[in-house]
Amino acid sequence: MTDMHLSDVSTLRERARKNVENGAVTEGYSADREEILRLLNESLATELVCVLRYKRHYFMASGLKASVAADEFLEHANQELEHADKLAERIVQLGGEPEFNPDLLSKNSHAQYVAGKTLKEMVYEDLVAERIAVDSYREIIQYIGEKDPTTRRIFEDILAQEEEHADDMADILKDL
């Protein structure tokens, strides 16, 4: 059991009026906000780099087995863009600014942008990038712990989909 107690209504109301300009970030927010914003922006960069790589692969896929892979590339690109939107929205909720500067995306991204020349190389590079995302998001979730449950849940949802993406790419790679 914990020694945690719930605040009475008057205390909740009083605290809500303090620093109201901070929006969703209340006194009860216990994470290092600047560090969380840094992690969110790095993850945003990762997702945007993945969108670009998947889009290139979608358009460049050719060969007998290309249609199955191309369909996955496009689906993943769209899902990675949804991830980026969720991360950017959370950055703003925490009072930060999402970094969309193209000059900084590759620098801040955990995953690399490797184009790949053949379909097999493309799938391989996408699988590598998904594995990087899985490991980095898992570490971020562990780092956040209970300090920021909203951000943790966003990363948990994204992680689940990244694991699916890795599984999809591994299946396609086996067939090439």
Image (cartoon, grey):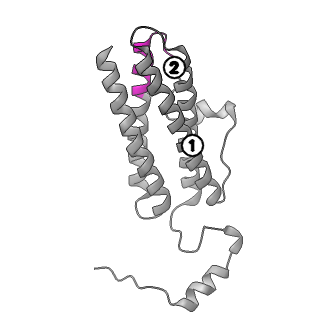
Picture quadrant where residue 100 is located: top right
Q: Residue at the location (53% across, 74% down)?
A: 28
Q: Which residue is mark 2?
A: 57
Residue position for label 1: 84
**Is residue 125 inside the magenta stretch?**
yes
Q: Tell me how far mark 1 sits from mark 2, CA to CA.
A: 19 Å
Q: Tell me the amino acid under the disc marked 1.
A: Ala
The residue nearer to you, when weighing 154 against 70, is 70
Give the residue at x 54% y 89%: 9
Rate crowding at label 1 as few (under 14), some (14 to 19) or many (20 or more) other CA atoms within 10 Å.
many
Residue 138 placement, left or right of 10 = left
Q: Residue at the spot x=38%, y=53% of the render?
A: 142
Horizontal and vertical percent for residue 36? 54, 54
Write the start and end of the magenta stretch as one range.
Answer: 115-128
Q: If you read the primary sequence from the N terminus, does the residue marked by circle 1 or circle 2 appear first?
A: 2
Query: Where is 45 relative to 149, above or below?
Result: above
Residue 69 seen from this side: yes
Q: Residues within 10 Å of mark 2 (few under 14, many from 20)?
A: many
Q: What type of secondary structure mainly makes up the magenta span?
A: helix
Type of amino acid at the residue the image marks with label 2? His
